[in-house]
Amino acid sequence: MLRSLFDNPTLPIGIDVGAGGAKLCQLRRRRQRLCLHSVARVDRPALAGPEVSEEGLAELAERIAAAARAAGMRGRRAILSIDDRLVRTRSVRHPPMPDDEVTQAVRLDGAQRLGFAEGEDAEIGWLSAGEVRQGEEVRRELIYVGVPRGPVERLVMRLADRGLIVSAVEPGFLAAGRCFTRTLRRASDQGIVRVVVDVGRCCTGVTLVRGEQVAFHKPLDIGGERLTRTAAERLGLEPATIEDLRERRRLAEAGLPAEIDAKVDRAVFDAVRPLMGDLAHEIKMCLRYYSVTFRGAKPERAYVVGGEALEPRLAATIAEALGVPTSVGSPLEGIDCAGALGDARPGPRPELAAAVGLSLGGSAAKSVSAASDGGQGRADEPPALDGHRGRAAA
């Protein structure tokens, strides 16, 4: 075991693709300690929808491959997460049954439950959230996860053309959650509940993790774009102007030099505060569902991550609504970053949560299965969305 750690010190490249572009991260092991090898970012203009043209996909893949080369990332193996707008989830209760029977059941009804059109080509997987009591019966709550196959397949193939071999595809919420549960390995840790709130450009994902197991996930349609539009309408300014002001406020929150007038800062905050309150209320409802469903312990902590996590006073607004200690999440906490962050930017780097978690996932040697094909995979196809382990595998 120790020999294998030194023989393969570099973990896969985590590629987190979202509405605003892509974040890349690669970790490595050194003397049994995790270290940050390098990070990179690829920006792209905001899109009207999650799918892009073939030319756009080719350009995105080329820019991702170029960024990986420029950052000195090693090897060809990568783990990918795709735009959250393509990912569909739903909680479903089943009677207790073996995992292989669950996979068969999900294969039969998963596409319909997730709202895919009849005949639409989709990859469907599932996660076990835990056992719940329904009247006198014990049921097993599952989280169905599905994505349309076409966009994933095309991006995987475009990356392969440029030398990056995607060996797994994983929903970003699983990867982000991994950053804050990787130290929970003891049996006594498995009852610890944490909340991960991933605030992106177009939506927010709320994930509750019990020990190392995802127990709940729900996407909310509030993200950075809605904050920008709301502030623009309230202040009578162009969205581009508001976006610029919001970016300056986030830079200042991160401890970087940014010119922002105190009165302007207050005006923008007053404009977005009601929507931030709505977001916090929706997160509170998620926690209420969890507590009623699983009768579990109250979360010990909440982490706010994602590209919009540094919105000033957002974490405090969420903390007030939840009554749970809440902070901007630091996915690189406990990882040696010496010399790897060339921009010397201070702060927790919450936007890297999914990319860090994807690379971390490369150290987990787990068998996986997909509801669509039993996880076997075929040599001429990209990896399928994982089933009960929450990942995809070739």
Image (cartoon, rainbow, N blue to C red):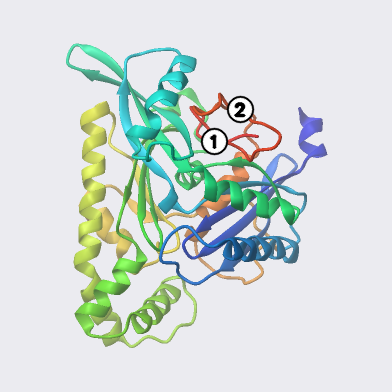
Which residue is found at the position 53% from the left and 50% from the top? 151
Quarter the N terminus occupies: top right
Quarter occupied by the C terminus? top right
Residue 130 is left or right of residue 15, and the answer is left
Q: Is residue 194 visible?
A: no
Left or right: residue 333 compared with residue 252: right
For the point 55% across and 54% down, which residue is it? 16
- Looking at the rendered structure, the kind of residue marked 2 is Lys
- Nearer the N terminus, badge 2 or badge 1? 2
Q: CA distance from mark 2 to mark 1?
A: 9 Å
Q: Quadrant of residue 210?
A: top left
Dot 2: element: loop
Pair 2/1: label in front: 1
Please tell me which residue lies in front, 166 or 6.
166
- Asked if the residue under mark 1 is in contact with the one under mark 2, i.e. CB atoms within 8 Å, the reply is yes
Q: Circle 1: is it few (<14), some (14-19), or many (20+) Cα within 10 Å?
A: many
Which residue type carries mark 1?
A: Arg
Measured along the vertical axis of the image, is residue 161 above or below residue 268? above
Residue 72 in percent (x, y) is at 76, 61
Under tag 1, what secondary structure?
Answer: loop
Picture coordinates of residue 248 (x, y %)? 42, 79
- Give the residue pinned by disc 2: 366
Q: Is residue 96 above or below residue 293?
A: above
Q: Which residue is mark 1?
A: 391
Q: Is residue 340 visible?
A: yes
